[in-house]
Image: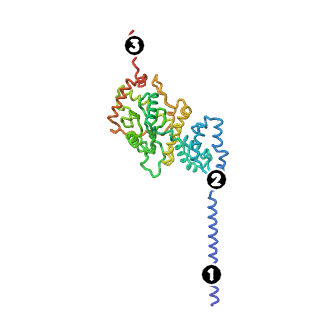
Amino acid sequence: LVIHYSATMLSVVSRKKLIKQLLREGVRELSLEMLNQLHHKQRRWWVRPWIQRREELGASSRLLQELKEEDPETYRNVLRMTAPQFQELLELVDPLIKKQDTVFRQAIPCKTKLEITLRYLATGDSFRSLALLFRVPHNSISVFLPEVLSAIYEVLQPFIKVPETTIQWEEIQKGFEYKWNFPNLCGALDGKHIRIKRPPNSTSMFFNYKGTYSIVLFAMVDADYCFRYIDVGQDGRANDSTVFRNSTLKIALEQNLLNWPRGGLCVGDDAFCLTTYCLKPFSHRGLTVEERVFNYRLSRARRVVENAFGILASRFRVFNTPIPLNVNTVEILVKTACSLHNWLRQTSPRTYFPSGSVDDEDLNTGVIAPGAWRNMPSLMLPIDRLYSSNNYGRDGEEVRQWYMHQFMTQLSVPWQMTSIGIEPILTVENE
């Protein structure tokens, strides 16, 4: 009996060991299979083969080089500047954007990063499209783009600097008087909405009156279509009064921090407040001839800021699509585009502003030939107008009335009556 019991127990123990062994082997095989599947899902290469051929076949090495040598005009259209200008800009930003090679991979050349950034500004193309053109990973573009934008703005910021002395302001006044027949004028004001993608966790913030999301670019422009002051980043909810009121320009003007010349003026449309230093047109119905002439003269001078914004949007078409970047990067992008605008306007006016780019008025007939930018679509919207008593100032009205009378007497120009649709009366002297 004892021997039979012992044999039975040994049989049970053997079966348990066998079961445990089978389970261990099954778990081992299952684990190996899972690891094998994970291994197949891992990246098949460290760098995709077509990206590895960037130096031989990428746009930086092939297409742009061919255009530079064979078709300079198309090269300029691609990057919005000539090859010598690109080289000059590259030398300026190179120390700020250069990265060191590592043991794993070579750094993207500064030349390629600058070309991609300029092409993005020029077109607003998606990062994936730029990745295919330049053979650079799209996630790498999203990393270096803000760095390159900041570098460009840093080196070109002196071209967008606010005048610091009264003499510098007086030079701007001379430009407005000579070109636009408006004395004492230091700048033309306007603001535009820059469309952006809806920021995460954003409901009403950045939501503008057109039902889209935007930040505001507020600017003052001189007689040569250059930005002299920019304020970027107020959210799209802002209307006309809050944009100007919250700008550092208004604060500096009221606290006399700009060495503003005595009697200096800026002009804006009806969205701005009427003050002793900021004039706007008459807006009520039944305007007199004198008021219509004043409005024409003011509009003629203010046309520079309309054209500056128009040229900016037509040259840098990233503004013609909602910008899919975070708000901080969009702010840097806008500042960079404005600084590039000024740099190109001042260093190569003929290529950046070819004939027909801006509005051209025939002084004999009063007919205005619209600039080429007006035929292009734009998502830049004017700031919302808020009509209230805050837009009117008694002292400002006295200044406006003074200029209205001067434009009919000492400051009149021969073509102003024709320009408002009134034929001048010709007098014939008796023989």
Image quarter in which the C terminus is found: top left
Label 1 sits on a secondary structure element that is: helix
Viewer-proximal residue among 227 and 238: 227
Q: Could you classify mark 2 by the number of other residues whose Cα lies within 10 Å: few (under 14), some (14-19), or many (20 or more)?
A: few
* Number of numbered discs: 3
Give the label on residue 105, or none: 2
Q: Could you classify mark 3 by the number of other residues whose Cα lies within 10 Å: few (under 14), some (14-19), or many (20 or more)?
A: few
Q: Which residue is mark 1?
A: 13
Task: Tell me where residue 147 appears, x and y as whole percent.
Answer: 54, 48
- Classify residue 276 by image quadrant: top left
Distance (Cα) linking label 1 and label 3: 134 Å
- Give the residue type at disc 1: Val
Residue 157 in the figure: left or right of residue 240 = right
* First-in-chain label (2 vs 1): 1
Q: Which residue is mark 3?
A: 428
Task: Tell me where residue 185 appears, x and y as whole percent.
Answer: 42, 32
* First-in-chain label (3 vs 2): 2
- Give the residue type at disc 3: Val
Residue 362 seen:
yes
